[in-house]
Image (spheres, helix red, strand yellow):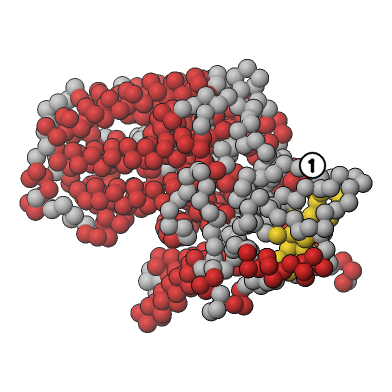
């Protein structure tokens, strides 16, 4: 019986396969795509992804049913929370200017299986999101014509009474998706130009709404006679924040487009900052004028802005609002159809998804197979499926991606930079002198143990501390951590931080409602898990970070990513149990794809199977600990500084 059990070495090798990270090429700017997008192009793509129908519908819904005029505060808090996630994307997009967004960022820092699952969830998120926006676009246009399109379809085609299917086939929604797919397949420049047109119209309408809204504003609508500024109190503001947070989902299209940016190191961070700032300003100002034009309790949640102008005697303004809403929905559609095929392309290019999706058209320089296939799938979803039950699924995929990107930032910042050791030519005698990196701050490697013994004292004094090593100020108090390999303690601390965050948020969300904990145990658990979170954070901070690079870096690491992790987990736990059930089923399907195809066809797996010559190096760390390093000696691409060394296997400490 025991002979059928896997050996520990086999399990270790299997776990290493699951957590292997992507090796990046020498030239990060080399690509089969067309680098033609400027900072303005990326900014407008981001605005198009964020300022959609939510500006015309969400503001009124939250104001009337959740927060009242304090929806303004909800948008401010939600904008700040989104900024934490956006800054993480900005740093990765500048350092790794490759398509793939959250999938790519997770692959180069955390591990392969986690990256695949993130990409798998983002894939479904974009498909459902695009189809849902297409149906909303169709419904909005149909309402302008008094639902004549719907009545015609039900009369001549028929209505269905089947679970999970729409009441009638929405040919208009499917048609707009097919038209958008055709435009996207013409290339990034055409897609960008089309997005410019719709964004310009949408922003013009928003400017009109703001000017007219302030002219028609009545401060008495915030008075106590109308219920006051915050009629639902602090709880209403925070509940509104959770809803408003999803209005800012869409800036990741900028990171997904970084491989088509002319200067991604500068353009991606700037575009994310500009687009998020403009989107936040638009949501806040529209909320101000909407709640000042008419009393918040009399708003129509389905068409708040158009109804507000109609009630103030400007019915003609409703047509302008409708035009702006349709153009805003068009930009969201373009954003979804633009991002999805590029993430699928990145997965296929790495061998984790079917290779046919990695084909790039030689003339348009876009992944045309992915655009057509997933455009057709989106159109099919919009045509026959009832998407209302699936819309909440959008949130969990986005929040999970945000969480892993934030964790990846912490892991990346405290990882040791790679030191490349050139292989000696055949017949050459190895240099007896110790091999040193390009700067005094890098690890010193020795050809033999005797070299190390002769020079360890001198190098220990001269050597600077590397990323992932304990800071000198904490060494007297945490000396037992000095013998760990750089980055190991930080990785364990990040896992502990995430577990503590999950437990803390679970108590906050379910402690009083579902678990019915007594006050003393509720308070005790909150204190314990908060301490675990803070201690993990302090332990990470006690280690050295990577030195400043020429690209953008998020400030206050690890605090900023840690706050983003807590917020994302809290919002995920607020979702319904049916959303989690559907999420679990989709994850199981993804694992079948990964273990049936991805793990075997992964480029990292094929790289491991290639024959390698090995050489030994003895590495001394500032703590004085010695490590024998077995390293593959072969012509291989070098990752960007600061990314993990995947060709090195630590065998003995």
The percent position of residue 182, horizontal first and vertical second, equals 54, 20
Position of the C terminus by quadrant:
bottom right
Q: Residue at (46%, 34%) from the top-left corner?
A: 267
Q: Residue at x 46, y 27 (%)?
A: 38
Q: Check the picture and name the quadrant holding the N terminus.
A: bottom right
Residue 331 visible in the snapshot: no
Q: As drawn, is 330 to the left or to the right of 342?
A: left
Q: Is residue 45 above or below residue 297?
A: above
Local SS, label 1: loop
**Which residue extends farthest right?**
427
Foreground residue, 133 or 546?
546
Q: Residues within 10 Å of mark 1 (few under 14, many from 20)?
A: few
Residue nearest the observer in this picture, 63 or 446: 446
Q: Residue at x 88, y 51 (%)?
A: 429
The front one of 456 and 389 is 456
- Residue 374: x and y in percent read 58, 31
Give the quarter of the image for residue 342: top right
């Amino acid at each position: 019986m025991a002979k059928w059990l896997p050996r520990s070495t086999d399990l270790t090798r299997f776990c290493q396969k699951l957590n292997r990270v992507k090796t990046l090429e020498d030239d990060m700017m080399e690509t089969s795509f067309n680098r033609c997008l400027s900072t303005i192009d990326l900014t407008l793509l981001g605005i198009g992804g964020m300022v959609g129908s939510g500006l015309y519908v969400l503001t009124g819904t939250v104001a009337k049913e959740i927060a009242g005029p304090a929806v303004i505060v909800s948008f401010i808090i939600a904008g700040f929370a989104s900024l934490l996630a956006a800054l993480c994307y900005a740093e990765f997009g500048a350092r790794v200017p490759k398509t793939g967004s959250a999938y790519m960022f997770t692959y180069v820092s955390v591990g392969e299986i986690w990256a695949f699952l993130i990409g798998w969830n983002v894939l479904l998120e974009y498909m459902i999101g695009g189809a849902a926006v297409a149906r909303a676009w169709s419904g909005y246009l149909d309402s302008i014509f008094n639902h004549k399109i719907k009545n015609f379809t039900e009369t001549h085609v028929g209505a269905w009474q089947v679970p999970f299917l729409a009441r009638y086939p929405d040919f208009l929604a499917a048609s707009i998706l097919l038209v958008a797919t055709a435009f996207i397949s013409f290339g990034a420049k055409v897609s960008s130009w089309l997005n410019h047109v719709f964004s310009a119209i949408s922003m013009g309408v928003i400017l009109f709404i703001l000017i007219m809204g302030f002219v028609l504003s009545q401060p008495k609508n915030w008075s106590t006679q109308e219920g006051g500024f915050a009629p639902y109190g602090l709880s209403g503001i925070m509940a509104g924040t959770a809803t408003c947070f999803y209005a800012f989902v869409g800036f990741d299209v900028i990171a997904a487009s970084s491989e088509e940016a002319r200067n991604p190191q500068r353009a991606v961070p700037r575009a994310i900052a500009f687009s998020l700032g403009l989107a936040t300003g638009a949501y806040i100002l529209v909320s101000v004028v909407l709640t000042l034009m008419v009393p918040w309790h009399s708003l129509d949640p389905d068409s708040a802005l158009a109804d507000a102008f109609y009630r103030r005697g400007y019915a003609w303004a409703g047509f302008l609002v409708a035009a702006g809403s349709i153009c805003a929905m068009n930009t969201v559609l373009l954003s979804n159809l633009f991002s999805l095929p590029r993430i699928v392309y990145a997965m296929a290019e790495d061998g984790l998804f079917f290779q046919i999706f990695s084909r790039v058209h030689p003339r348009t320089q876009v992944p045309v197979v992915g655009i057509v296939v997933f455009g057709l799938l989106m159109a099919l979803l919009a045509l026959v499926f009832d998407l209302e039950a699936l819309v909440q699924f959008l949130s969990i995929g986005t929040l999970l991606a945000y969480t892993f990107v934030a964790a990846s930032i912490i892991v990346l910042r405290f990882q040791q930079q790679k030191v490349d050791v050139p292989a000696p030519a055949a017949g050459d005698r190895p240099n007896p002198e110790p091999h040193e990196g390009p700067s005094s701050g890098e690890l010193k490697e020795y050809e033999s143990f005797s070299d190390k013994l002769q020079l360890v004292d001198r190098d220990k004094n001269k050597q600077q501390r590397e990323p992932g090593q304990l800071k000198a100020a904490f060494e007297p108090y945490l000396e037992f951590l000095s013998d760990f390999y750089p980055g190991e303690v930080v990785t364990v601390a990040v896992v502990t931080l995430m577990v503590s965050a999950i437990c803390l948020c679970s108590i906050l969300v379910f402690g009083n409602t579902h678990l019915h904990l007594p006050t003393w145990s509720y308070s005790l658990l909150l204190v314990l898990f908060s301490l675990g979170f803070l201690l993990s954070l302090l332990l990470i901070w006690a280690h050295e970070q990577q030195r400043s690079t020429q690209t953008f870096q998020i400030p206050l690491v690890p605090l900023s990513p840690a706050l983003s992790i807590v917020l994302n987990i809290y919002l995920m736990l607020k979702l319904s149990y049916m959303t989690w059930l559907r999420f679990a089923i989709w994850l199981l399907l993804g694992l079948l794809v990964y273990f049936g195809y991805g793990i075997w066809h992964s480029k990292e797996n094929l790289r491991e199977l290639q024959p390698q010559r090995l050489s030994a190096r003895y590495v001394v760390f500032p703590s004085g600990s010695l490590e024998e390093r077995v390293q593959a000696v072969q012509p291989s691409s070098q990752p960007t500084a600061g990314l993990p060394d995947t060709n090195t296997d630590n065998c003995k400490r």
